[in-house]
Image: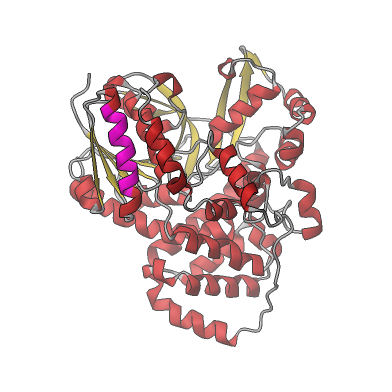
Amino acid sequence: MTAPFKIAIIGAGSVGFTRTLVKDLLSAPALQDIEIALTDINEHNLSMIRQILDRIVEVNGFPTRITATTDRRRALEGARYAINCVRMGGLEAFADDIRIPLKYGVDQCVGDTICAGGIMYGQRSVRAILDFCEDIRAEADSGVRLLNYANPMAMNTWAAIDHGGVDTIGLCHGVQHGWRQIGEVLGAEDPHDVEYICSGINHQTWYVDVRYKGRRVTRDELIEGFERHPVYSKQEKVRIDVLKRFGVYSTESNGHLSEYLPWYRKRPEETQRWIDLSEWIHGETGGYLRVCTEGRNWFEEEFPRYLAEADTPLDPAKRSDEHASHIIEALETGKVYRGHFNVKNRGLVTNLAQDAIVETTGFVDRFGLNMVAGITLPDACATICEASINVQRMAVKAAIHGDVDMLKLAMLNDPLTGAICTPDEVWQMTDEMLVAQAKWLPQYAHAIDAAKARLAKSTVATRDWQGAASMPVRSVEQMRADREKRRGGVAPDQQVVA
């Protein structure tokens, strides 16, 4: 057993995700005699998640200590690990990330990584990450590690490492989701019969080597498997098309991948050809925003059920494959864990920028994070990733310095935004987003009045458009049915979307 230590969770008011993280931690015997400090700005949500976790600890007779506070520094005091799962600006800012670019023809499904929405999300998040890192340096254990789950993953992790001065690992579950799909189309009864090396950047990671029961899987075999699949052949048209052209499968959902590339969402009449509306994640315009908005109080409805479920003894066999608990267990016990992590490149991926944050294969044990170096991506994959890296680099610089000119250049060079908008449209759209989100952008306080003045004189036309892939208005009964369908999967308060 390990000596007692402390884990702080920032943004613990994400009730469903925090519940998953803590149940995972408690499923490892070596991680039960610890303190888990919850912190959030929302006292009500904090109270709900603490009640659930206290019940789990009590029912299972664990020695775990659960604390909760709105004072972030207090939660971080002496912490050996900090986990960040915060969405800065909440649904109000998220709505502007989707709504304003749509006026200029930029049709996003999620808008949390790059594209216009993801870049603005980064401006809010990076500023917050620096504040978190300042508190971590001041209050946490000297060897503290920050596990970042918050999007935009690459920008946040980049800022924390280069400007926050905190040892940071970025974590996402997209790789695991795609792996299960590959296992299914190959007919694997046990997905663990499928082994793989995945590499790239967050939300643009590629299965560069796939083995099924030790045999290397060919490109043609994957194409055939996905095209004959009765569901994926309809829901994953973008991913399948990219697989055919690039020769490798992407980790990301149809909706996500379509907004990182300049080809699939730029012509309204073409967009619906690539999008499936059976579920939001396959490309619906503003799909994740809609799901989060409809379910913004889902945890109020689910709280009694979650509390009742806490009376059932924890089953370690149901531990999820979210990385956090496995990483901490490996560091504390030496039990080796293999996964895909967001870290500085520094030679890991040979044909991506060395200063970039890459998502690639590594191992964790008591000696730390040990990444596999020397992976080379197919040229087409590297080209697409490098375009996004350049945008991320400019966006982080803009966020650190409150540099409006750099922010506009990041927007202009974004693959999808640049495929749709003229420079004048990009300049005006960025001003509009800055003004709308000013209260979350203290680093831009000096520039807001000038942006307002430019908007007052602007002659660039916008459009009243709902997007080319919008779901019809749904009934309350349909919304409830969707929530029921999601109960076994990712809760809408989870910040990492894959």
Q: Position of residue 82 (x, y in %)?
A: 30, 41
The stretch in magenta equals 46-58
- In this rendered view, identify the residue nearer to me: 290 or 246: 290
Q: Is residue 477 magenta?
A: no
Q: Is 227 placed left or right of 485 in the picture?
A: right
Which quadrant of the figure contains the C terminus?
A: top right
364 shown above or below 47:
above
Which residue does the image show at 62% across and 23% down from the upper left?
A: 210
Horizontal and vertical percent position of residue 120? 50, 62
**Image coords of residue 51 (percent x, y):** 30, 40
Name which quarter of the figure residue 106 lies in.
bottom right
Q: How many marks?
A: 0
Residue 138 x, y percent position in the rendering: 19, 50
Task: Using the image as rendered, state which of residue 208 and residue 466 is in the foreground.
Answer: 466
The reply, left or right, for residue 285 in relation to residue 430 is right
Q: Residue at x 46, y 36 (%)?
A: 347
**Camera-nearest residue between 14 and 192:** 14
